[in-house]
Amino acid sequence: MRDATKGVLAMVMACTIWGLSPLYFAQLKHVPAIEILCYRAVWSSLFFAAILAFQGRLALVGQAVRGGQVWVIACAAALISFNWLVYIFAIQTGQGIEASLGYYVYPLVAVLLGWAGFSERLQRMQWLAVLLAGSAVLVLTIGLGVPPWIALGLAASFSLYGVIKKQLPLGPVVSVTAEVLLLAPFAALLLWLTGDVGALSWDTHLLLALSGPLTATPLILFSFAARRIAMATVGVVQYVNPTLQFGCAVLVFGEPFSKWHAIAFPMIWAALLVYSVSAIRQDRAARKAVSSDVTSGTVVT
């Protein structure tokens, strides 16, 4: 099997796990969202640390923290914990449709942040995609009488998380391990102060423990895929995640899909189609340029 094929399969598997995660969190509705977040931080830290220890790379986490990057890692940890908390809250309160909207919109918010914060140029098609997405949010705001705060919170926090991660010269597994290891002591303290660990049944504790591998496995698969396939392919395949979330919300949980959703979501899907076509074209043009430079011997080393 070719490396590219392995990469696509790994990406699909990662997005499938993320996309079906509402089914997991729905089994924990009897546990407060903040407690689920705390358990997730604790179990994820143990699971990630075990993986890096097995690989002989656990020392990299200590090096990253001692290297003066602790505040950047702390900011990333705060953003991802906020993202996790909002998502868990959305599933527990029957707002999975809006959560899926957040992850549909996220790539376009990330593009907009790149333009605003890093002076990255946007092509006409990308501006059109952003305009369509903004119009969809406006439709939902007018139609439902309130902005889709959960979707906007998820998209903004994950986009800012990506911006901060760009400042860290660390691999994805090492950086996330550092983040959850920073979160774990605070999470454990909060559970000790407010949580009633003994009141939870053994099967609930087992489900909470599964949050460790549930967090780590798709990230490892994503990291494997990102090294083997073009980023444009990663961008297109990642829409499997919110699509499965959307399917869980509508088909499994039976969340109401209003006429305003019926107007806004096709606009979002159209925006993502426009954006994906633009990204694929840019990726092909960049690869052709590199190939041309190699052929003509003008590559700078």
Image: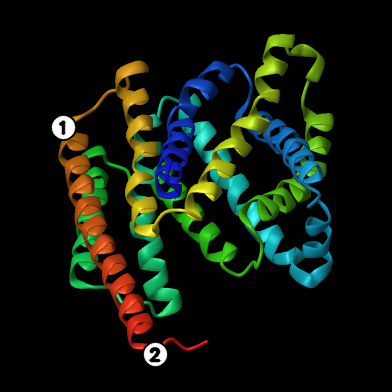
Would you place residue 57 above or below residue 217 in this image?
Answer: below
> Which residue is painted at 73% across and 65% down in the image?
71
What colour scheme was applied to this rendering of the protein? rainbow
Quadrant for residue 197, please give it.
Answer: top right
1 vs 2, front mark: 2
Q: Amino acid at mark 2?
A: Thr
Q: Quadrant of the N terminus?
A: top left
Return the residue at label 1.
259
Q: Nearer the viewer, residue 121 or 218?
A: 218
Residue at point 63% right, 21% down? 31
100 lies left or right of 224: left
The image's mark for residue 298 is 2
Check disc 1 and give the amino acid type. Lys
Q: Position of residue 149 (x, y in %)?
A: 40, 45
Q: Residues within 10 Å of mark 2 (few under 14, many from 20)?
A: few
Is 33 located above or below residue 104 in the figure? above
Q: Is residue 148 visible?
A: no
297 left or right, relative to 34? left
**What residue is drawn where x is 60% and y is 16%?**
30
